[in-house]
Amino acid sequence: MNRGTTTRYESLDAIRGVAVMGILAMNIVAFALPFPAYGNPAAGGPPTDSDVATWFFNFVFVDSKMRGMFSMLFGASTLLVIESAAVAGRSGAGAHYSRMFWLAIFGLAHFYLIWFGDILFLYAICGLLIFLFRNLSVRALLLWAIPFFLIAIGLHTSLWAMMSMAQAGTLPPEAATAMQEALRQMNADMGPSTPVYAEEKALYLGSYASIVAYRTGAMAGDPLFFLGLFLWETVGLMLIGMALFKSHMLTGEWEAARYRKWAIACFAIAVPPLVGLALYQMRTGYDAVSVFGSTIALSVPFDTLMTIGWAALIMLLVKTAASHALRARLAAAGRMAFTNYLVTSIVMTTIFYGYGLGLFGSIGRLPLYLFCIGMWAAMLLWSKPWLDRFQYGPLEWLWRSLSRGQVQPMRKRLPG
């Protein structure tokens, strides 16, 4: 594959910039409200019309799709890192596994010390697996992605089906007790107006020490739980990202008409069933079984299609509509995605948690997107000036230095 033009790298960086901004739109509710509210607009009390409309839009168009795009781009970037190491005469395996080790450390620090919604540890463990697929063709990568998705869907759908049977009282007696307990826990975590809502609000309006103590105590095993829940799907998404990179889709080399065709097709197929799943949750009053089934199990194939559709649409807009200045700003935000992702967590927890401004649980779903807009503006404003002076973002530099075992040059040599 011939890679080398600035435009192609700029396109890949630009879509990564959109993804790191988009993942905030997905996570903002989890930053600002107790976790039951993430998938349930009725958690904490009767929702307003704007709450429901915002949740509906987020479920259909944003939730899981931005994480999916971030995951696909991680797979694509993995290929670039391995190839760059080989060109520089270094071991591709050594470079990759060292990066994944330090990414796991960053992820655990992020989880325990900053915010519980970390995805870096998950990515590091998935990264250990996707290295094995690096030399496969586009077709082989797509074929290998299928069983990973099927395992994810099968595991989650079977659990959802058993929960549905427990809810309906149709499970055999020997299985009913365990499932009823699991259902009770799900309702506590995801159902409407649960005690968990008030408990989390009190926790996150408390001190930094009390929050860290809770994460390192009651939540200590959550990174492994999250890994078990999302590993199969995430590896599948990363393999698709590797395939799309090798097919030149993520490097901006397709014709605009092809991007347009893919975007229309993916949205046309994915939107109707996702709308149906949203309506299903509304009809059940957002009970835990419908939220779990719709969010974790039944939506996976449609979320994946829409993720690809979003990638195609963003590449189309970058290629045909974005000005040179905007592309440069987005590309800079993408080159600093690691820094921007972690800084976002620091900024948002400082705004909402008790050791900062203490706004946790006090702002409705729709106004929360004003904070997203502010953070997006900050990313676009600061990333390019930083990279005009330095070779890497600050955390990219730290990650690179740790991975290579020596301090990397940081400041650019300016002409003159």
Image (tube, helix red, strand yellow):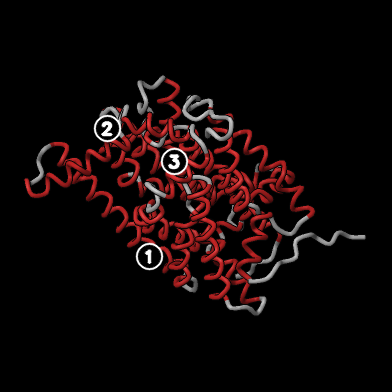
Query: What amino acid is found at the position of numbered circle 1 in the picture?
Result: Leu
Q: Which of marks 2 and 1 is in front?
A: 2
- Callout count: 3
Task: Assign the N terminus to one quadrant of the image.
Answer: bottom right
Q: How far is disc 2 from disc 3 in space, using C-alphas?
A: 18 Å
Badge 2: residue crowd in 10 Å (few <14, some 14–19, many ≥20): some
Query: What amino acid is found at the position of numbered circle 2 in the picture?
Result: Asp
Residue 143 is labelled as 1
Q: Nearer the viewer, mark 2 or mark 3?
A: 2
Query: What amino acid is found at the position of numbered circle 3 in the picture?
Result: Asp
Residue 164 position in % (x across, y down): 19, 40
Residue 287 is labelled as 2
Badge 3: residue crowd in 10 Å (few <14, some 14–19, many ≥20): many
Residue 99 position in % (x across, y down): 56, 66
Q: Earlier in the sequence, mark 2 or mark 1?
A: 1
Q: Which of marks 3 and 1 is nearer the N terminus?
A: 3
Who's the residue at 65% across and 76% down the image?
87
Quadrant of the rendered image containing residue 325? top right
Secondary element at tag 1: helix
Q: Nearer the viewer, mark 3 or mark 1?
A: 3
In the current view of this chain or complex, which residue is farthest to the right? 416
Q: How far is disc 2 from disc 1 in space, using C-alphas?
A: 36 Å
Residue 63 is labelled as 3
Task: Assign the C terminus to one quadrant of the image.
Answer: bottom right
Who's the residue at 37% across and 26% down the image?
44
Q: How far is disc 3 from disc 1 in space, using C-alphas?
A: 25 Å
In this image, 49 relative to 358: left or right?
Answer: left
On screen, 403 above or below 190? Answer: below
Who's the residue at 32% across and 62% down the image?
147
Query: Is there any visible trace of residue 308 in the rendered image?
Result: no
